[in-house]
């Protein structure tokens, strides 16, 4: 069996597949371009939903980290990146919708700054808007799709973002299983794939483990 990873894998991730007897092809389905941005005021409560957003935010904010009181984050690796840079993560959620509902329930009287991609999803800002919570958006990166063509069918395709799904389906067949890093990615995949499987945790390693187990047992 052969799977396709829509992100280039590092050595330990490659070994997970190979040790399970699976072959793999990997490529970067998306490319990230940082966007220059300016900060007009101090930010106490920030929202970051991706590692890409966190990296560009950190590059800009290095000299002003002390002004930030709370970080509200999607994904364990994004949390780890922020904590490594001495930022306090108040809440880590599995997806933007879960994070928005937490904020509405617990921080309704606070205002927020959302550092996001230019192609960000609508759920989180819409939920906050509906609850009359002030949330300023700052675009810090843009996603470009790498619409590569594969003249074959894989036993499974590993997706780590909705944009990666869009990049793959632009020029390839969907007669396979979509293994997704989280529910947000899975929502996009279900539009195109008959079978979509969601990882137990929002990490590449967990997505790989889910694919290995599923392909070995048929479910």
Image (cartoon, rainbow, N blue to C red):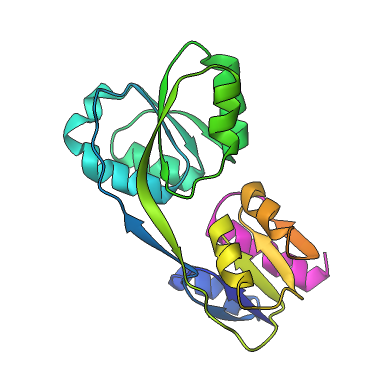
The answer to whether 100 is drawn above or below residue 158 in the figure is above
Tell me which residue sits at (33%, 21%) in the image.
44
> In this rendering, would 46 be left or right of 176?
left
Horizontal and vertical percent position of residue 84: 32, 41
Q: Nearer the viewer, residue 71 or 13?
A: 71
- Answer whether residue 131 is visible to the viewer in this image: yes
Residue occupying the far bottom of the picture: 151
Residue at 46% from the left image edge and 20% from the top image edge: 134
Q: What's drawn in magenta, residue-wise? A: 199-219
Pinpoint residue 4: horizontal percent, then vertical percent.
Answer: 60, 76
Q: Is residue 161 visible?
A: no
Q: Position of residue 178 (x, y in %)?
A: 70, 65
Q: Is residue 154 above or below residue 119?
A: below
Quadrant of res 169: bottom right
Give the residue at the far top of this rendering: 109
Q: Is residue 90 above or below residue 32?
A: above
Quarter assignment of residue 131 = top right
On screen, residue 8 versus residue 164, left or right, reads left
Front residue of 202 and 57: 57
Name the quadrant of the N terminus.
bottom right
């Amino acid at each position: 069996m052969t799977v396709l990873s829509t992100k280039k894998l590092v050595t330990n991730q490659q070994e997970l597949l190979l040790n399970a007897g699976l072959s793999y092809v990997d490529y970067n389905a998306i490319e990230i371009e940082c966007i220059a941005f300016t900060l007009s005021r101090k930010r106490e409560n920030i929202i970051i939903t991706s590692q890409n957003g966190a990296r560009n935010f950190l590059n800009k904010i290095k000299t002003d980290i002390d002004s930030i009181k709370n970080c509200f984050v999607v994904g364990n690796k994004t949390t780890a990146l922020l904590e490594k840079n001495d930022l306090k993560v108040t809440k880590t959620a599995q997806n933007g919708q879960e994070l928005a509902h937490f904020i509405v329930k617990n921080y309704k009287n606070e205002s927020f700054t959302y550092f996001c991609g230019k192609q960000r999803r609508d759920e989180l800002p819409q939920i906050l808007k509906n609850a009359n919570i002030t949330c300023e958006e700052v675009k810090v990166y843009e996603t470009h799709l790498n619409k590569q063509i594969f003249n074959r069918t894989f036993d499974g395709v590993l997706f780590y973002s909705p944009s990666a799904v869009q990049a793959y389906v632009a020029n390839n067949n969907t007669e396979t299983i979509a293994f997704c890093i989280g529910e947000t990615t899975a929502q996009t995949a279900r539009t195109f794939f008959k079978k979509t499987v969601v990882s137990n945790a929002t990490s590449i390693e967990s997505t790989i483990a889910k694919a290995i187990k599923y392909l070995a047992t048929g479910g």
